[in-house]
Amino acid sequence: MMNGNTPDRTLKSHAGRKLDAWFEVDRHGLSRVTTSDSKGRLLGELLQNAFDENVTLVKVSLQPQSGRSAVDLVIEDDSPDGFRELDHAYRLFAESAKKGDPTKRGRFNLGEKIVLAHCESAEIASTTGKIVFLPTGERQDRPRRKRERGTVFKAVLKLTRAELDEVNCYLRSILVPAGIQLEVNGQQLPSRVPVRTLSTQIETIIADDSGVLRERVRKTEVEIHDVLPGEMATLYEMGLPIITTGDKYHVNVLQKVPQSLSRDGVKPAYLRKLRTAVINAMHELLDEEDVNAAWVQEATSSPDCSDDAMARFLDLRFGENRASYDPSDREAGHAIQAGGGTVVTGRMLNGQQWENARRANAIQPAGVIHPSPKAYGNDPNAPSAKEIHPDDWTPAMQNVVAYTRFLASELMGVNLRVRIVETGNSFLACYGGAELHFNLRHLGRDWFFQGASEAVDRLLIHEFGHQYCGDHLDDAYHDALCRLGAKLKALAMDKPDAIRAFERSLAC
């Protein structure tokens, strides 16, 4: 039914009347509808039929006709069975045995018809006969003109020189299936060995018991190939290119890939599954330039991203010395950054990436990795503090405590509570909640005999800074120390006698 003007077949008469077939197909109209399709893909439709058979050799010849936008096309294979259903060359959507086999490329029985729609004339000769498609739009069936083996397709294909270049580029991009030689214009295309072959569960197309094509999840092998100079990473179906992806590798799925009728794209969810399978298998080969690539971001955003792949991604993006931001211990984050590490904040990863990272135990809070010093620590078994009762304070202790409260009031406007404790915890003094503790164990009793000295002022300014910021490495803390030092100078100038009252010679 490829006649552009009249039906190519009339059904047998019924009850004395002649019945026409339901459908007619205008080949010129079909050609116009598919003009935007890749011309390389046209040859792919023919090559897939050859690759699906028991062939070892496929030859393609493309010879431009002088002065015309046309080429003489010949495709020949050595299949011992040949084209078993020769009428499928012109019968649209005929039932195909390939529909139930996910390892065969054909499915719609449409490919040859699209190719023929772009031909001026054509013929197909095989083990089951020969069909000639005439320039007039008529067809001749020659069932006795049989070949001993294989099929040959000859045609005058309408192609511009630019389209011919596109076809040649398409042919060079084919990943020739194992065990098959593909020759183009007498030159054998090189076979390519995959970098890795992985197994994964992913959707394919299989006909059900009623012959209806349906998506099914099936385990299959996927080949990963390097992208050679001048190429773009491409998604393949059993060696034939589908779409360019821009990823790091060519991905060749060794079963039917769910596609639309035009066979020029896949669903985003399908591509995401493939990308995740690839990163799980190839993560050790990623480099720092890869981590911001769209395919890596998508794969690491999948819940199926492996722990090892997620850890590798984080190593490359943030370095091994990394931690998540810890609002309960901001100083820990600053300490990690000061040591050349990276603190990863919320917006640096999306929600699923954070979940994957935590599941893989690949990122921990800064306060866990590099906890900032705590006066009494977080260990329940840490040494306990024994408070020295004010009645037991020496005059020197009372003097320093009074001086401390005086400065707290003058410099910060804080009514400070001061305690003297004795503990093995490693601090001289600690401040928090308008309360300051002196650790007698580490200061020693003699320290208090200094009175209002530079050493005492230095310790008090350090602790008073925590009234404004608890993080020693934060700029706010450093600013507070500067303000307190400046205020202490002004206080000494304005109230020198008040400060002298706490000097050692007067207090002890």
Image (tube, rainbow, N blue to C red):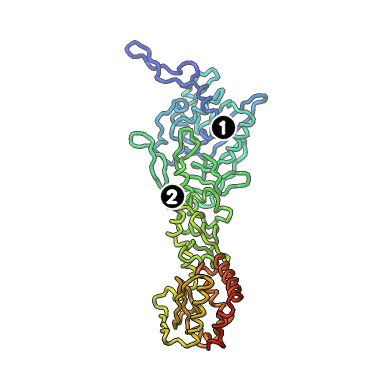
Residue at the limit of the structure toward the top, as seen here? 16
Residue 420 in picture, x, y percent from top left: 45, 81
| Residue positioned 59% across, 26% down in the render | 158
In the rendered view, does 54 fall on the left or right side of 211? right
Crowd tier of the residue under label 1, counting other residues whose Cα lies within 10 Å: few below 14, some 14–19, many 20 or above? many
Mark found first going from the N terminus, 2 or 1: 1
Rendered-image quadrant of the N terminus: top left
Q: Secondary structure at mark 1?
A: helix
Q: Quadrant of residue 75?
A: top right
**Tag 2: amino acid:** Thr
In the rendered view, does 420 fall on the left or right side of 499? left
Residue 350 in picture, x, y percent from top left: 47, 52
Determine if residue 330 is in view.
Answer: yes
Q: Which mark is residue 200?
A: 2
- Name the residue carrying label 1: 39
**Tag 1: amino acid:** Lys
Q: Which mark is residue 445?
A: none
Q: Secondary structure at mark 2?
A: strand
| Residue positioned 53% across, 40% down in the render | 243
Residue 173 in picture, x, y percent from top left: 58, 41
The answer to whether mark 2 and mark 1 are in CB contact below 8 A is: no
Crowd tier of the residue under label 2, counting other residues whose Cα lies within 10 Å: few below 14, some 14–19, many 20 or above? some
Front-most of residues 347 and 283: 347
Residue at the limit of the structure toward the right, as seen here? 67
Distance from label 2 to label 1 (Cα)? 32 Å
Front-most of residues 247 and 42: 247
Determine if residue 364 is in view.
Answer: no
In the rendered view, does 271 fall on the left or right side of 70? left
Does 355 appear above or below 85? below
